Amino acid sequence: MTLKSLTQLTCLALSLILTGAAYAQKMTTIRNKHLTVSINQIGAEIKSIKANDTGREYIWPGDKKNWKRSAPIMFPVAVRFKDDDYTYKGKTYTMPRIGYVFKTPAKIEKTSKSEATFVYESDSKTAKFYPFKFKLTITYRLEGKSIIHDFQVENLGKETMYFDLAGHPGFTLPTKGGKSRKDYEFVFSKSMNVRRMPIETGLANPNTVPFLNNETRLNLADPRMVGKGGRVIRAGKGTVIGVAEKGKSAFIEVDLGDFPHVGIWPPEEKPLICLEPMIGHHDFTNAPAQIEKKKQLTALPAKGSESYSFTIRVK
């Protein structure tokens, strides 16, 4: 990253922080007989998923010591671009890491008792780092013990638009009774035989390595889960990944729905785990600078739109 790019990124981050400060912790709450869900206007980010019958909290609340987020939405980049820069039509742009949505207040389009819709649209500020005209609509719907995340990405411009989209929900690992990471497992809805992309400083190494070998469960303390960085796999659309106490059924699940990739981020020695549904994935360590040549991105034609969905399910 050049000094100019670093300065631009710092100024942009400061602008987003100052803008968000005026909206800090403005919550929208939706509920049904099973769940109560709180969503922050900043980032349209879920901050709480609580079971009405037990009062149990499932979403990581965020703190400075472990991880300050809860469930950020990543758009129009998943994690970061190489060097945090990219080019389009010969001009260089600096893209904020994990995009801009997570620090930006959303427009609350509509709410009901069990549903809420948030909207982001391009403007003069977004044009400084993303020269495409877009509209991103995020809707949360409660159905039984499920929180359905619906996304619609619209290209309002006259040229092809390139983007990525991902969720990043973090879930609390209960530590009462002396429980630790070794007492929890991932539970997969099908036997998984997949390789993973190693993550290096927020970028994906294209040289994949073995990960799961026809397995349906994986302990959080398994050696394959040790080490910094996430584990990104192509799990396949509709795959369900749960978190469970060892040998038991899952207490929380993420149904990937329309998202083919998932990032599994296990911050070591911390009482949380993140499951990140991704349309694409991190930029590659050897990625080209031109945004139209970044293979993990979706190319959306002029005036086109795409819809995606994933679900968090409390068991």
Image: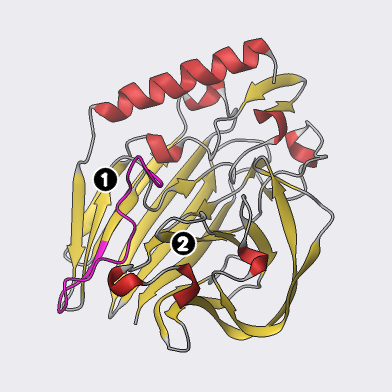
- Looking at the rendered image, the quarter that the C terminus falls into is bottom left
Residue extending furthest front? 178
The label shown at residue 298 is: none
Viewer-nearest of discs 1 and 2: 2
Look at 57% across and 68% down and name the residue there: 258
Q: Secondary structure at mark 1?
A: strand
Q: Give neighbour class at mark 2: few <14, some 14-19, many 20+ (Cα, 10 Å).
A: many
The label shown at residue 273 is: 2
Q: Give neighbour class at mark 1: few <14, some 14-19, many 20+ (Cα, 10 Å).
A: some
Check the image and report above or below for 312 versus 88. Answer: below
Q: CA distance from mark 1 to mark 2?
A: 29 Å
Q: Identify residue type, mark 2.
A: Ile
Q: Position of residue 86 (x, y in %)?
A: 71, 29
Q: Identify residue type, mark 1.
A: Ile
Look at 34% across and 49% down and name the residue there: 45
User: Based on the displayed image, in which of its 4 quarters is residue 217 positioned?
Assistant: bottom right
Magenta segment boundaries in residue numbering: 49-68
Q: Is residue 307 magenta?
A: no
Q: Position of residue 103 (x, y in %)?
A: 39, 35
- Looking at the rendered image, the quarter that the N terminus falls into is top right
* Residue 261 in sight from this viewpoint: no
Q: Secondary structure at mark 2?
A: strand
Look at 58% across and 36% down and name the residue there: 157
Mark 1 — residue? Answer: 108
Check the image and report above or below for 30 versus 95. Answer: below
Judged by its main secondary structure, the magenta piece is loop
Q: Position of residue 299 (x, y in %)?
A: 69, 48
Nearer to the camera, 178 or 112: 178
